Amino acid sequence: MGALVLGHGAGGGIEAADLQAVTAVARDQGWAVALVEQPYRVAGRRAPAPARQLDAAWRAVLAELVAGPLQGVPVVTGGRSSGARVACRCSADGVARAVLCLAFPLLPPGKDESKSRLPELDGVALPVLVVQGRSDRFGMPPDGPGREVVTLEGTHALASDLEGLSSAVGAWLAQLLTG
């Protein structure tokens, strides 16, 4: 099939319910899944590193995976929240075939539109699936060229409709390798 490489959000780790649900549906379809824990979390810190450090760590992990166990396998990258942002920023590296964004943090709460992260999504030239909670305090990204946005009941955690999440991601993953 393919491989799905997912990063976690800024405030949590790879045990997040939405990451675990996506991992299960992908594995059920025969995908290999790698859940990537950022170095700041491995070191026991709670605050995320600056974007350039997150991106550098992500790129190093991807390079190791595609040179080793994922060599020759189609790779989809992504993650939840901050992990989705990292995958978007690194999507032009030639590794990913598509990007999966769970709870993309479009706009930090209380900030004006000048702080929008939409340019990170718009900068992805690959197929993108964004799965967003209808009541996500970080806002709702729009559909765009090559980008599908699925809205579920719930918040930024995406935990209130794990069945809907699994269904949306499962259908998208199946379509990627057949379409």
Image: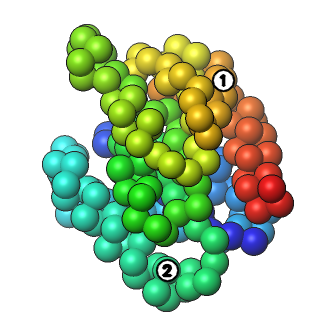
Q: Residue at x 16, y 48 (%)?
A: 50
- The kind of residue on which mark 2 rests is Val
Report the residue at 80% width, 56% height from top. 179
**Image x and y of residue 80, in percent:** 47, 43
The answer to whether residue 15 of the structure is visible from this angle is no
Q: Is residue 168 left or right of residue 50?
A: right
Task: Indicate the position of residue 170 as horizontal and vertical percent values.
Answer: 76, 49
| 102 over 100 or under it: above or below | above
Residue 176 placement, left or right of 67: right
Measure the alpha-carbon separation of dots 2 and 1.
32 Å
Q: Position of residue 93 (x, y in %)?
A: 40, 65
Which residue sits furthest right?
A: 178
Badge 2 density bin: few <14, some 14–19, many ≥20, Cα 10 Å:
some
Compared across the picture, whether 26 is left or right of 54 comes to right
Q: Amino acid at mark 1?
A: Leu
Tell whether 134 sits left or right of 56: right
Residue at 44 percent of width and 56 percent of height: 91
**At 44% across and 37% down in the image, what residue appears?**
121
Give the colouring mode of the picture: rainbow
Q: Which residue is mark 2?
A: 66
Counting from the top left corner in percent of width and height, residue 19 is at 55, 49
For disc 1, the neighbor class at 10 Å (few under 14, some 14 to 19, many from 20) is: many
- The outermost residue toward the bottom is 68
In the figure, residue 163 lies in which quadrant?
top right
Quarter holding the N terminus? bottom right
| Residue that label 1 marks | 152
Q: How many marks?
A: 2
Query: Judging from the image, what secondary structure is the residue with disc 1 in?
Result: strand
Residue 136 or residue 113, whichever sits in front: 113
SS at circle 2: helix
Say if 51 sits above or below 81 in the image.
below
**Nearer the viewer's eye, disc 2 or disc 1?**
2
